[in-house]
């Protein structure tokens, strides 16, 4: 499937969200280690929840027909990732710098790309 109206960048965002989400769902230990988090049951649980949310959003991008609904999904994804970036940057002292930087960088990148794609379609 192709994310029409957004070209290869839209396809890359959708595929990236699905891949990143599936990594959290299927391999939470790898993901949480990359982010510098301890390998504990609660963190694996949260990584799986995050993975489901992220993969679903990517799948919705692939499924939506061109038009206003697809643009709305991109706007929602940009907003969600912008909030996640803010949460990462304002995390407390009990969160490592590595975790903050990794989370802010990945969420910020997705926010910028989805926001730019949405802006092109508005």
Image (cartoon, grey):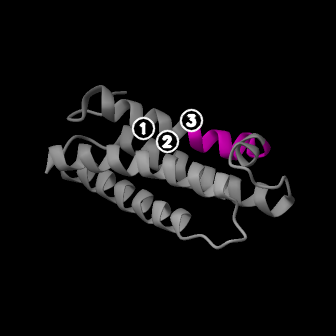
Residue displayed at 46% across by 50% down: 57
- Decide whether residue 26 is among the magenta residues: yes
Label 3, residues with CA under 10 Å away: few <14, some 14-19, many ≥20: some
Q: Is residue 79 above or below residue 108?
A: below
Residue 17, numbered label: 2
Numbered circles on residues, count: 3
Instruction: Read off the residue under disc 3.
Output: 19
How packed mark 1 is, by other alpha carbons closer than 10 Å (few <14, some 14-19, many 20 or more), is many
**Residue projecting furthest to the bottom:** 92
x then y, percent, for residue 10: 32, 35
**Can you give x and y, in whole percent of width and height, for residue 8 in the image?**
31, 26
Residue 63 falls within the magenta-colored stretch: no
Left or right: where 120 falls relative to 40: left
Query: Residue at coordinates 25% horizontally, 28% vertically from top-left?
Result: 7
Does dot 2 land on a helix, a strand or a loop?
helix
Label 1 vs 3, first from the N-terminus: 1
Viewer-proximal residue among 47 and 2: 47
Q: Main secondary structure of the magenta part?
A: helix
The residue at the far right in this view is 40
Which residue: 74% across, 46% down? 28
Q: Can you give x and y, in whole percent of width and height, for residue 30 in the image?
A: 76, 40
- What is the magenta range? 20-29
Please tell me which residue lies in front, 2 or 105. 105
Q: Mark number for residue 14?
A: 1
Is residue 56 left or right of 62 when viewed as pictured? right
């Amino acid at each position: 499937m192709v994310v029409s109206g957004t070209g290869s960048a839209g396809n890359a965002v959708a595929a990236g969200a699905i891949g990143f989400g599936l990594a959290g769902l299927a391999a939470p230990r790898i993901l949480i280690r990359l982010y510098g988090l301890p390998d504990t049951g609660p963190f694996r649980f949260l990584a799986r929840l995050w993975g489901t949310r992220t993969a679903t959003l990517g799948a919705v991008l692939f499924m939506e027909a061109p038009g206003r609904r697809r643009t709305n999904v991109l706007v929602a994804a940009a907003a969600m990732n912008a909030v996640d970036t803010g949460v990462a940057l304002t995390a407390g002292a009990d969160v490592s710098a590595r975790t903050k930087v990794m989370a802010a960088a990945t969420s910020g990148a997705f926010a910028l790309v989805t926001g730019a794609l949405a802006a092109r379609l508005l």
